[in-house]
Image (cartoon, grey):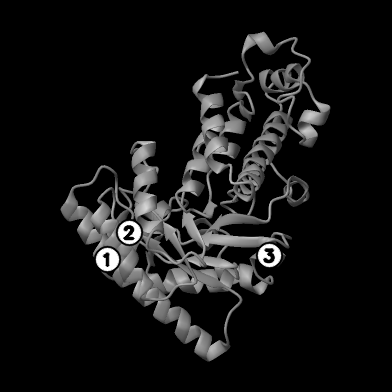
Amino acid sequence: MPVGTAATVKGLRQEALEEIGARIILANTYHLYLRPGHELVKRLGGLHAFMSWDGAILTDSGGYQVFSLAELRKITDEGVRFRSHLDGSEHLLTPEKAAEIQLALGSDIAMVLDECIETPAPRNMAEAALKRTTAWAGRARRYFQEYAQRNGEPAQWQFGIVQGATFADLRRESALQLLELDFPGYAVGGLAVGEPHEVTCEMAAEVTALLPKERPRYLMGVGRPEQIADYVAGGIDMMDCVLPTRAARHACLYTSEGKVLIKNARFIEDQRPVDPKCKCSVCQRYTRAYLRHLFAAGEITAAILATHHNVWFYLDIMRQIREAISFGQLGNFAAELRARYEAGPA
């Protein structure tokens, strides 16, 4: 899922996302709650109408953003009291409030509020966060179900989030507790935050082994191109990451030959496309020399073109993964992908 935090994927119009083949994007509850406000978005017809996007939308609960405000928030069993990074105003985000905001936004998939902790974390902290995450998930589920009883079933799925840091038994415990709440989909949170890739895969696999295969399994906040197939092999269906858009704005382009750091002087006269094997409209039209010039000149078009290519590249990896699965070749595809990127920048 391309990340469109504030109801936009940075640097891309919705028309470009459609051209690229994006079917679902991610937006963020915390940011949209503070600006422009969920009630305004609801009055304007909901998030799809507001941003003129006919595809699916997943909204994160805002938990990660709030917990990253270490100096501006206080966590209790009630919820998270925090000060806005925009104007310093005080707010209380509870499991119920996060559900309410996302129902107002009208996203297709809504995440429950969970407690994110730093990694590595001591076991007692991970246990406490797990207990609170489960309690919050229960409250969010009840709020959602009571809303459905009063207003009719909303066109929205609510996902639970498995926590447990890097402790396999806690991950399993969290998954089993969430299964009792009968969510239509489940996410694995609190990973890819500094632990080795192998540990991320191990923890995700511990969880997916317990989750029902007929319901979506979502690994949050991953990953690098060469890692994606490993997560799928471990049972993950959905992922999101800011990397393709963020890297693009910093002149890092992902290709079938590895990373291209386009500001390097050796691309000054390079007449090749960014990726000779890529079928995106940027690679069909523009040269490495031109993109390097745009970045050197500080032109905004540089980030737009780079973002278009990177998002297309990520979605094309997913297309290739689906094809590899259909031919029983996922393991080979994953190994080839890793080999390309271990060689370093192209």
Q: Is residue 79 visible?
A: no
Query: In the image, is residue 30 above or below residue 294?
Result: below
Q: Is residue 172 visible?
A: yes
Left or right: residue 324 versus residue 98 is: right
Amino acid tagged 3: His
Residue sticking out furthest to the left: 124
Which image quarter holds the C terminus? top right
Left or right: residue 52 versus residue 7 is: right
The answer to whether the residues at label 2 and label 3 have Cβ atoms under 8 Å apart is no
Residue sticking out furthest to the bottom: 150
Give the distance between the C-alpha atoms of the residues marked 3 and 1, in whole angstroms.
Answer: 32 Å
Query: In the image, is residue 49 above or below residue 281?
Result: below
Which residue bears the numbered disc 1? 132
Which residue bears the numbered disc 3? 48
At x 53% / y 49%, what residue is drawn? 240
Location of residue 340 in the rendering, given as x and y in whole percent from the top left corner: 56, 25
